[in-house]
Image: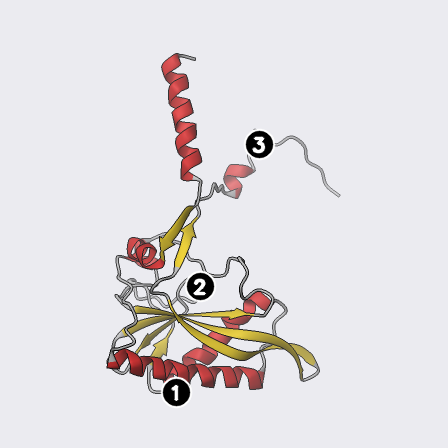
Amino acid sequence: MTDDREKYIKELEKTIAQFLKPLKNIPFKIAIKAMSGCNVIPFDKNNPDDKQLLKDLIAATRIAARNANQKGIFTRRENEVGNHIEPFMIEALNQVGLQADRPETKEGKKKTVGYPDIFVKDRKGRPNYIECKTYNERNYQTTQRSFYFSPAERPTDFKVIYDARHFIVSFKIERVEREDKMAFVPVYWKIFSTDNLIGQIKHEFNSTNKQMYTPDALLAEGNI
């Protein structure tokens, strides 16, 4: 191997090692802008329209929490409760006079998977996005990874297509017995703005089954 070739390989290894390190303290608004081209509009506590929006979000969250508590959420996995509470929130938002539904992509497709969970127009017709989350006393202030999103395979398939305000509506969940079965119910709620949300971007090495399961790499196999 020539000296130039060896130097190139070492520089390439160093570059890849740096690339795989997480980028820390990245503002949420910067990540959204980079992935969607859309701005995260800050929530203004002094703006009358924003005040009304928060009032409506509070009313809807109360309704959603009460209905989900009364009905109960029956699922085996606690981390799936947030998915089940989304329909309660959409219904409640519409009930208080807003226009809520699943977010649409630029291709006009409604998607349930991925960030964000809900698209809602307020009384002024302004677009807003809501992400529903759940927590319990054990994990509320831990470093558990609970909020994340990634770029769509096609930029036009990402669910953020408007400059908008972004909110997190989080429900405290407890286990109870309903109809002789174990269920999860919300017992408390909180609404957060993402204006100052900070996170990290973590790169990863990934491979497909086709790339991984090759005849050349096979060392042994057998049946039972």
Residue at (30, 66) in percent of width and height:
108
Q: CA distance from mark 3 to mark 2?
A: 35 Å
Q: Earlier in the sequence, mark 1 or mark 3?
A: 1
Of helix, strand and loop, which one carries label 1? helix
Quadrant that contains the N terminus: top left
Coordinates of residue 120 in the picture (x, y in percent): 33, 76
Residue at (38, 61) in percent of width and height:
197
Q: Nearer the viewer, mark 1 or mark 3?
A: 1
Mark linked to residue 95 = 1
The reply to whether discs 3 and 2 touch (Cβ–Cβ < 8 Å) is: no
Q: Quadrant of residue 79?
A: bottom right
Of helix, strand and loop, which one carries label 3? loop
Above or below — where is 126 with respect to 142? below
The reply to whether discs 1 and 3 touch (Cβ–Cβ < 8 Å) is: no
Q: Earlier in the sequence, mark 1 or mark 2?
A: 1
Using a 10 Å C-alpha cutoff, classify the residue at mark 1 as few (fewer than 14 neighbours), some (14 to 19) or many (20 or more).
some
Coordinates of residue 69 in the picture (x, y in percent): 56, 83
Residue at (52, 70) in percent of width and height:
134
Q: CA distance from mark 1 to mark 3?
A: 58 Å
Mark linked to residue 215 = 3
Q: Quadrant of residue 110?
A: bottom left
Q: Quadrant of residue 12?
A: top left
The residue under label 3 is which amino acid type? Answer: Pro
Q: Nearer the viewer, mark 1 or mark 2?
A: 1
Q: Is residue 5 left or right of residue 50?
A: right
* Whether residue 152 can be seen here: no
Q: Residue furthest top?
A: 2
**Residue assigned mark 2:** 113
The reply to whether discs 1 and 2 touch (Cβ–Cβ < 8 Å) is: no
